[in-house]
Amino acid sequence: MKIIKMLHQRHVLIFLLLLGYYTTALSQSGYGLWLDYKKVSNAAILSQYQKQIQSVYFPGESETLDRAREELELGLNTLLGTRVNFSSTDSNKASLTVAKFDDLTPKTQKKFGKIEIASQGYYIGHDDGNIIITAKEDIGILYGVFNFIRLLQTEQPLENLALLDAPKIDLRILNHWDNLDGTIERGYAGKSLWKWQKLPTYIDQRYIDYARANASVGINGTVLTNVNANAWVLTPSYIEKVAALADTFRPYGIKVYLTARFSAPIEIGGLSTADPLDPKVQQWWKTKVEHIYSKIPDFGGFLVKANSEGQPGPQNYGRTHVDGANMMADALAPHHGVVLWRAFVYSEHDATDRAKQAYAEFVPMDGKFKENVILQVKNGAIDFQPREPFHPIFGAMPKTALAMEFQITQEYLGFSTHLVFLPKLYQEVLQADTYQQGKGSLVAKVIDGSLDNHSISAISGVSNIGSDLNWTGHPFAQANWYGYGRLAWDPYLDSATIAEEWLRSTYSNCENFVAPMTRLLITSREAVVNYMTPLGLHHIMDTDHHYGPGPWVSELPRPEWNPTYYHKADASGIGFDRTKQGSDAISQYADPVAKKFGQLDQVPDKLLLWFHHLPWDYKLSNGHTLWNSIGLHYQKGVDQVREMQKVWAQMTPYVEPLDHKQVSMLLNIQLQEAIWWKDACMSYFHEHSKLPFPKGMEKPKHSLKYYKSLKHPYAPGI
């Protein structure tokens, strides 16, 4: 018996050691995202928080309020390192009150009565020295709780709080390009989260963690399936599965949307046509929508990619995008659902500049769409490039609600191996001035509906989330998910503020960490532009998988798929002429913008070759020739990655060892690939310029033939 007891104790000890190791490894894996709460490390601030928050009054019952109460309890107990008392009945001794406005005491209601809390919003303030978090709706309480916890995570002072906040955009949506077989188009972080075979009975804990993370940054909608849609998701068996996800997400204020394949009435409905003006087709969609709402009462609506890149649509039947979108809108309207109709269209039958085609197709339709149709427009006119000017549609359709579509997954920015802080890109687009109604007509004002007084507003981000343990492949790609959510809530936020928030919440509040790492994040986007597509170059990646450089690709069947179509490098120079002498794409912008982009003395260097074809010896404002400037920008991008490595190497005191090693290895890959981009592109362009490589640029390591020979048939994301 003694031997058995000793063996049992040994097994228990081994189990506990393994459990501790696993827990530590999980903590270091990044699974907890920015919500992996840790005890406040600053002793003085911790002591102050512990004095200010000793007990909590949190009345009310609902699924959403329960989630908010659980989150606050977890956050306070962990961050303060002590158990905080919660009560739903006794408010007298509470130092923190969390309650809907109607549940506040009459005295507090009177004090806060003039504060106008908007839909989904909240207010955090003080009453007689006690902290109050209040809102008109349950979801506002949840958002207020998450923001209050963020204040503690980032070690902000709680004295004199008077924080009134609400989302400026109504629908803040993630678009998952997930296929029903578990693959993800342009996904670089593993397989799809959705385990369709196990649904609806099996609810993975990860679905709950996903909803919690989204709610923490204010995301309130998710499109579960790929825009290159599969009609099967609209069948009854799959609607049951979708309903189970909707039930899981609902307490966190998240609605589900589905991508609707336009030919679904044929493929799963037994009809011979999908003509949107055919009464049988119209009735099929109405019946299908009624069935969906019988299972999912708060279903958000449909996202549709039609007549684009081979997807079926109304033009197959001689109809228009208006006909197709309005047909679906009529089916959804009685249930308050919306149609998000994508404006990403370009045709192999249209010989005009691809950058002009979406504008030419959709702007004449302004004012013809139903009120519950939202036109979803990519941030730029080509396709999520490292840098594009804002899409000319923004501001040009004042009678139509327009949604921004950003890409969070890094299809063109190094997959999940490159550290690129995308909120900097998003901010650049959102703060661009369309001048459509004079100075100050920002893209952000178009999106939030304030420029044209739209009753509904929306923003979408193509997700970078997958089954990888850390969700996003690269640990720092989590910042892009976080940053997208924060800008979807408030498109006027500064990207540096977002970077600092995320760094403090995820890693450390130490200034020796926060300051240099904020600078690293903010410069990382410009670095990738420099080593991939400097000075307005675009779409020069390798074909299909979009991995690595391919400026020489010219043999694809559609001209606008070839990089040579975009850079137009030849013996005389390089760049796409979109001035009045060229494709005249500048005419799609308001006059002040068109003038700026069209004149060489006004166009920013960063967009120079997007709008102009210039000789290799053209002199830039910095005194360098165009050829030398291109080479020096490529070199600068490489050097910026080296600087990122140096900064990260100094961060070991503030980051878990496993995380630090992982990012270090990824930065090594990023440097190798930055050099590859520089060497391959400059070798190819050298064939046209015939000029010596500029001083200060490291010469290519291999021949152009070598770079052309590299093949990557199994690159991820296809």
Image (spheres, rainbow, N blue to C red):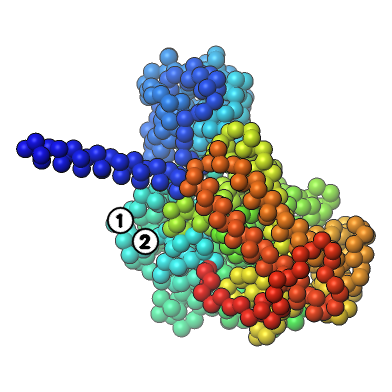
Q: Mark 2 points at which residue?
A: 195
Kind of element beneath mark 1: loop
Image coordinates for residue 363, horizontal then vertical, percent: 73, 66
At label 1, counting other C-alpha atoms closer than 10 Å, the crowd grade (few under 14, some 14-19, many 20 or more) is few
Of the image marks 1 and 2, the number of the one nearer the N terminus: 2
Q: How many numbered callouts?
A: 2
Label 1, on which residue?
202
CA–CA distance between discs 1 and 2?
Answer: 9 Å
Residue positioned 55% across, 38% down in the render = 654
Residue 699, position as x, y percentages in the image: 76, 68
Category of crowding for the residue at label 2, using alpha-carbon neighbours closer than 10 angstroms: few (below 14), some (14–19), many (at least 20)? some
| Residue occupying the point 24% across, 39% down | 13
Q: In which quarter of the image is residue 679?
A: bottom right
Could you say whether the residue bearing mark 2 is in a helix, strand or loop?
A: loop
Q: Please give left or right for residue 518 compared with residue 129 in the image.
A: right
Residue 41, visible in the rendered structure:
yes
Write the residue at 69% across / 50% down: 643
Asked whether, in this view, residue 21 is left or right of residue 672, the answer is left
Residue type at mark 2 is: Lys
Indicate whether 552 appears above or below 202: below
